[in-house]
Image (cartoon, helix red, strand yellow):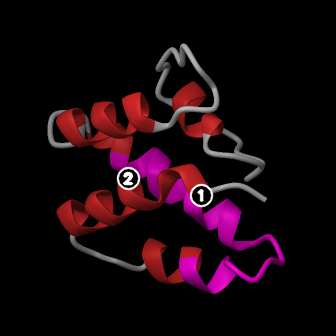
Amino acid sequence: MNFKGYDWTEIAEALKFHLEDPDNAQPLEYYILENWQQDSNIVEQCRAYLCVLSGHDTYESPLWTGLSKIQDDGTFISYFTLLLDGMWT
């Protein structure tokens, strides 16, 4: 998917996850945590989104860049979901 890095709902769209409330990231967080080991596309999409998000010139860009460099997928997903609702520009 061609992410723009505007907000975390782009991840839901890329994963074809239906959001009942676009202001509530929690269902998507649970979905990612429960399914990332069975579907490698989840990790790939999350990393791709972070690469685009970190390219925006914001004070949080270094955080997103650092998060995207975590190599262990389990650790990456743990922190990604923890910070998901703050991922917007």
User: What amino acid type is highlighted by mark number 1?
Assistant: Gly
Please give the name of the residue rendered at 51% of the width and 14% of the height, measured from the top-left corner: 18
Relative side of 36 to 86, left or right: left
Q: Is residue 78 left or right of residue 27?
A: left
Q: Position of residue 53 (x, y in %)?
A: 68, 63
In the image, residue 39 sits, relative to residue 46, either above or below, namely above
Type of amino acid under label 2: Thr
Foreground of the two, 23 or 28: 23
| Above or below, comparing residue 83 to residue 12 in the picture | below
Mark seen at residue 86: 1
Please report contact status of discs 1 and 2: CB closer than 8 Å, yes or no.
Answer: no
Per the image, is 44 magenta? yes
Above or below 21: residue 11 = below
Tell me: 46 left or right of 9: left
For image coordinates 57% across by 62% down, the residue present is 50
Farthest residue to the right: give it: 57
Quadrant including the C terminus: bottom right
Q: Which residues are magenta?
A: 43-63
The image's mark for residue 17 is none
Residue 14 position (above or below residue 63): above
Tally of numbered tags? 2
Position in image of residue 60 (x %, y %): 67, 78
- At x 28%, y 75%, the residue is 71
In whole angstroms, how far apart are the C-alphas of marks 1 and 2?
10 Å
* Residue marked by disc 2: 81
When asked about the image quadrant of residue 48, the answer is bottom right
Q: Secondary structure at mark 2?
A: helix
N-terminal-most mark, 1 or 2: 2
In front of the other: 25 or 15: 25
